[in-house]
Image: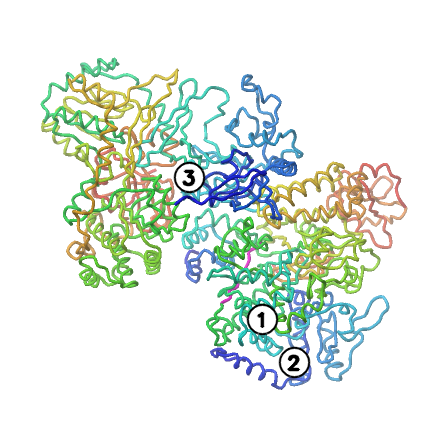
Amino acid sequence: MIDQKKRLRTVGELRALRSGLQAASKPKRLVSVSAASCGRASGALAVASALAEEIRKRGLESSVELRLTGCHGLCQFEPDIIIFPEKIFYPNLTPERVPLMVEETLVRGRTVSELAFKESTDRQVFPRLDDLPFLKKQVRWLLDRHLVLDPEQLESYLEHGGFLALEKVLSGMPPQEVINLVLASGLRGRGGAGFPTGLKWRLARESGQSEKYLICNGDEGDPGAYMDRGLLESNPFSIIEGMIIGGYAVGAARGFIYIREEYPLALERVSTALDRAREAGLLGDNILGSDFSFELELVRGAGAFVSGEEMALIASIEGRRAFPRQRPPFPVVRGLWGRPTVINNVETWANVPLIILKGPAWFSSVGTASSKGTKIFSLVGKVRYTGLVEVPFGLTLKEVIEEVGGGPEPGQRIKAVQTGGPSGGCLPASLFNLPLDYESLQAAGSIMGSGGMIVIDEATCIVDLILYFLRFAREESCGQCAPCRLGTTRMVRILERITRGEGSPDDLELLARVGRTMREASLCGLGRTAANPVLSALRYFRDELERHVLGKECPAGICRGLISYRIDKSRCTGCLLCLNSCPVAAIAVADDGYPTIDQKLCTRCGACFAACPPGVSAVTKLNGKQDRIAEKPGEG
Amino acid sequence: MTEKVETILASLPAERRHLVLFLHRVQQEFGYIPGEALRMAADYFAVSPAEVYGLVTFYSAFRLKPGCRHEITICQGTACHVRGAPELAEEFSSLLGVKPGQDDLDKGVAIRTVNCLGCCALAPVVVVDGEYQGRVHKERVREILEKLTGMK
Amino acid sequence: MPEPVIKLKINGMAVEARPGMTVLECARSHGLFIPSLCDLEGLPAFAGCRLCLVEIERRPHRSPACQTLVEEGMEIVTSSPELEELRLATFELILSEHPYFCLMCQEKPNCQELKTTMVKALEPGGCLFCPKDGACELQRVAEYLKLRRVAYEFEDRGRPLWQSDPFITHNPNLCILCGRCVRVCSEVRGENVLSFIGRGPRTAIGTFLERSLRESDCSFCGACLDVCPVAAFSERGVTAARRQKIYEHSFICPLCSSTCELKAEYLEDGRLRRILPESSGGPVHGLACARGRFGLREIGDLMREELFPVLKRDGREQSVSWDEALAAAGSLLKKYRPEEIALVSSGPATADTLLAFSQLGHLLRADNLYYFYPEAFLEKMAAFEKQQGIEIGKKVDFKELERYRTFVLVDTDLKSEALAFWLEVKKELREGARLLVLDSGLNGCGQTADVNLRCLPGMEAEALLALLKRVVLKSPRLSFYPGYHHLLDELNLWPQEQLTRESGLGEAELDLAAEILLSSSPALFIFGQRFLRQPGWVENLAALWNLQLRLEAGLLPVTGKANELLIPGFKNIFGLKTLAGTEEIEEAIRAGRIKALYVLGGLPLEEKPELLIVQTPWKTGLALKADIFLPSASCLESDSLLVDLAGNIRSSTLELRIPEREMKPADVNIISRLAGTLGFRLEIEGYRGILDSILNEEPAGNSGGSLSYLTLSSILKKPGDSTGPEIGRAGRPEVLEVIVGDNLDHYGGLAMAGLSPGFRAIRNPDWLWLNPRDGDRLGLREGQEVALETAWGNLDLEVKYSSGLRPGTAFISPVPDSSLKLRLYGQGIIKGTVRIKNE
């Protein structure tokens, strides 16, 4: 442990501390437990304590180190453990199976194939992490460190090369050179817009103002995206290091890390990391004996999606309603308290130390002509393997969804992928050859955004999905400008009408017009992109929309105004489970002794459908508006 | 109450930017933010009371009324949505007889929704009194509630 | 230096603009109309309505013209089919939540004549009852965009109306959330009552905890009414204008030093419809306050109930012609020797009236010419200057305010006493100037202040010394003013903690205030009447003088009575003595020294002299006793000549005559005609010239006065000094220190709140303001009737809370309409206990 009172006074002292840590003798084996938020939600802590208990019982303390790390990115398999040095991977571990694992692997050195990952299709066993198909196409520059780092220990970060980049910078690299390195690397903002980071830094450096600020935007609000949470919970020091370097480069003495309040663990870990860095003299006055001083402060959000917008974020830090302000002037000219402010997102900052350390040539060796390096996506939704994936720019959607994500869930077909969250668009499976880079996605009517990737299959209704996004955008609109506040509300009304089966073909034109207005006239990025889900749906899923408004049917069977339930007497056993399950008493026993559904009372909640035993399946879901169903002959 | 609020105020510099942090701390202390605390904050941070109210009503994290003993938070992230979060909310709501977003002080249980907890791979996610639960399916709702009512 | 010019192109046309202009301003200055709803001259841009979007070469997104500053070489397109479609689509979105049927009504072109158009749609709707009809800004935009249909059904938000306030109604269902009201309320007026609340579809205009305006420290300036583009904020009881012709005329409000130009609107039947600020400079610049626009509106018609003079003959009242009344007055006055005649002017009077009144007095050689004013502001200032051999700067030059970086208000609520001046100060605050408030009483500017120093009552001098001491310690630079070293020695006599303790202020706030004074200089110290009304006023002035001298700051006295006192230069040109109480005059009447009394306005007089002539717009209590009552025209309907704080002469001439409205003669004309019956001739036409020459006279300047530090130890009071007779033992928790504030809410001898229920609801002169904590401690609740017991007598009051007051103090601002209240005014600060009255 670093002596709390001992600040590192020089670069040399930091170097000495690191080599001391690296040289210290360590247990042979390391058991890494994925213990970020989602790991914990899956029971990682119970597994960890079972492990600790078992290790203690068998007297393995000196040969085995148990470490709670951040997110391994293998979220589908949480709670998972990885055993080093072999990198044996055990997914979905439960405390009950821990004794077996410890006995076999830690004591006898054998892998337990029944605990190992199996591809469901061919029953092939993958005991080693590196063999996982999920990882095959990934380039995990950032995520790989999450497997070994203890996010709360500065020593752990140092031991694995932490603050080497800062060391390099403070050993005589002029700020301009730092900026040149970042510029040369081609690093672009990972928050969505993809503005060249080095250029932003240069503008701030050359602003001619003495007071400047840095902000780390950790207000990751896109529903379905959690790359930044992963980074903040797993490797907070890398973000701190990136910001210190950024502060040095642009000449800022203060920075803020803004984290949404829905991420309590990230807040806690960053707070701890800041304390550790401060104690060690890596923050504060005259860092490592240089004449550079830098302070970082943690700011906790308060639940507003719009505060991820940079101008709104600034207002939020200042203690105001998160109303965005018209740009220009951009924050790099007039930001926090009117001063030049560099805002980058979490992943961007995390990339900075790597670029400094390994050089721009290394960094730009992967990616496309305009998008360099890797990008983390949160691959979720209706795909077999979900989690955080880090891939080089330029990989196609198909590669990510099918090879990394393992394709559709059994028995389903993938329909589309939503990238960029509520600001992005829904891209159909036919476009899956599209390479992942800023420009391609935008040209296709979506955006990269911060990296959310939600796969949907045929069981997902596009109208329902875009209604979901528009409701989200409506609730999260700050309310300042008319097109966004009212446009989202109008779209929600129109879409609700469509899901009720009351839509008309004119409604699609109206949606397009509202969408255009929002895109062209809204004040901030949120409003300008809030219509993207609708506009992309109109572009790629017009057929499905038309089936809603013209055919009055919902192909996915989701929109309640467009489906109905009936009881097929020929299959009904008269068990009356359906009748008992109905929350609105719409089911009654008819004269013939069979239950029937009163369509006027039915709310189409699907309770009867779920209650009917699988072998019987007498309750059937019919597609199409109710009054039209009545004319249809009963099916089956 | 006022003494506690004053202690919280005294722990923060009187700069407007700490207003949000103040509100977080007050809510942590009382479970909600009493009107008097807003008034005191306005005075302390030299922001008009109306503006403080405007701020507190902007952010969804803040509550101006006392909450319930038990809280069930259903994540409404996209991944959760496509994996059935709406039906989940409906199930909780119908079993409890409490509408989402409304506090039922008599029953002592509130159902809340949150935009995304960032645990998307575990969708759908429900937080029961602060404890995250992943892959919650409709069938588990009754079990969760029984456990919760057993706690009462 | 010639002003730099920016060259740019709008719609291909080369135009020039000043730096700092917005594209919208530039376009408008060249006669181009760009629709906009949230922008308003004088308000910071909001860019929320998005109707003013224009295309600017090389900018990827369209820019709001209201927020984009002109740049050299800019090429702007303000109109194109795409832009107009975008505007129309945005406008339709706005209309989806605002009733729009009136905008497209087919009867619209001729409903003026038909006058039959009724409610056309769901409430709220229908143009006949829309108070904004004809002035609604949506109408102009609809016309410009040639709106034919709206793609959405109107969706009523269904929110409750604000109906618990007098004068102001807010209908959130008509609101388009342009935010003008929020901006004018906070940025311009400094009221900070309104804010955006909620988010997304629930965004609304709201107050703290969504309370009524009355419970939100709203001063009812009405600015929200003036700027609202639709009828979301509307004046209560004012209906659509469309049904009849509106007559209007301008007048200058004489009620305080701001001399706001107001506009009165009358209906065809002669009834007063409403009073508005005259808004030649745009609605943001038009000034009015609750007194001028609502108070006068409520009493405006009452002041016309008496149209003809009343003569009391043999105990019988008789309505007579003006000639008869004035002839009678003249002949009766002639019967008295000059020393037996007294003339008293009371209540806000115009400068020309006062000139005529004093001139008549001098011609009559009357001994007793009074200006009824329950404090001797003028005399105290003059006495202090004379005694200390100094000159206090007196003239406010609005143009010079920008050189001050900190404004310090000491015992003056500029919002109430000098609204126009306050708005000038607010402008500087928006530009980054700082504001400190030092006050022991209620100060409406306190919440806007960077530091609001609420000191203990009567301890202003200690607070100023505490600041002085900090300033000297923090920045021990030598000053070359005489007596500086002596000052340092003297300051050592008062330990820091003693000053802090005695002033009742905190270390941190004093430190911060001193820091601001040093870092943001120069400062302008502005002090008001209450500063001089305290027992320790000499110490107050001395301490203030030393502090401003040390900081090389400005010093400025402010009074709401600028017109009557002729504050610039403190010239008592009228030669009127201040009559601070009525005892003196009543004694003279009883003793028979004064036999004839001519009163302008009202006077709380118990005794009646042999001859009493009362001239006032209405029948006040005194007028009922009068032998001759001369009902003059009110300020609403008179020509006027006034002087403001800055020493400017403001004049207005009543031009419009309303057919159905009988006009009364103005005060100055009555006095002049009365003088005629006495054989004198008053040159009232020349009064403007007289005032002009007095005001432009070179001030004596500082040449005569010395610029030196004043010795404090000899004049500073010792702690524990009594501030008058005490009631109860000091230190008893139920004893409150009560600060007596000024009350400018009266006119013509009567309290506005006395006659107007609405005004009373917002500005009850019988409120006892308490800090809520004291209320709790004393077991009181708001609205409760209590008796305030003081050594001078008891007042019946109603409890009202304000957290702007420091605990242990209370605040009253009674109208000086009784001898008790006059005595309390004289004390400035009193000790009192509160007793709950039996219910």
Is label 1 in contact with label 3 (beta carbons under 8 Å)? Answer: no
Name the magenta segment's main secondary structure: strand
Crowd rating for badge 2 (residues with CA inside 10 Å; few <14, some 14–19, many 20+): some
Number of marks present in the image shown: 3
Q: Are there few (<14), some (14-19), or many (20+) residues within 10 Å of tag 1?
A: many
Question: Where residue A97 appears, x then y in whole percent?
Answer: 74, 74
In percent of width and height, residue A480 lies at: 56, 45
| C708 sits to left or right of A392 | left
Chain for mark 1? A
Q: Nearer the viewer, residue C777 or A522?
A: A522
Residue marked by disc 3 = C214
**Eye-nearest disc, 2 or 1:** 1
- Give the percent coordinates (x, y) of residue B104: 59, 50
Q: CA distance from mark 1 to mark 3?
A: 53 Å
Position above or below: A357 against B92: below
In the image shown, does A504 or C551 lie closer to the viewer?
A: C551
Q: Is residue A269 visible?
A: no
Does the magenta run of residues contain A111?
no
Q: Secondary structure at mark 1?
A: helix
Tell me the number on the disc at residue A237: 1
> Which residue was labeled with disc 2?
A65
Coordinates of residue C196 in the picture (x, y in percent)? 51, 44
The range drawn in magenta is A295-303
**On what subunit does the disc labeled 3 rest?**
C
Task: Tell me which corner region of the image, top left, top right, bottom left or bottom right, holds residue A75.
Answer: bottom right
- Work out which quarter of the rendered image holds the N terminus of chain B and state it: bottom left
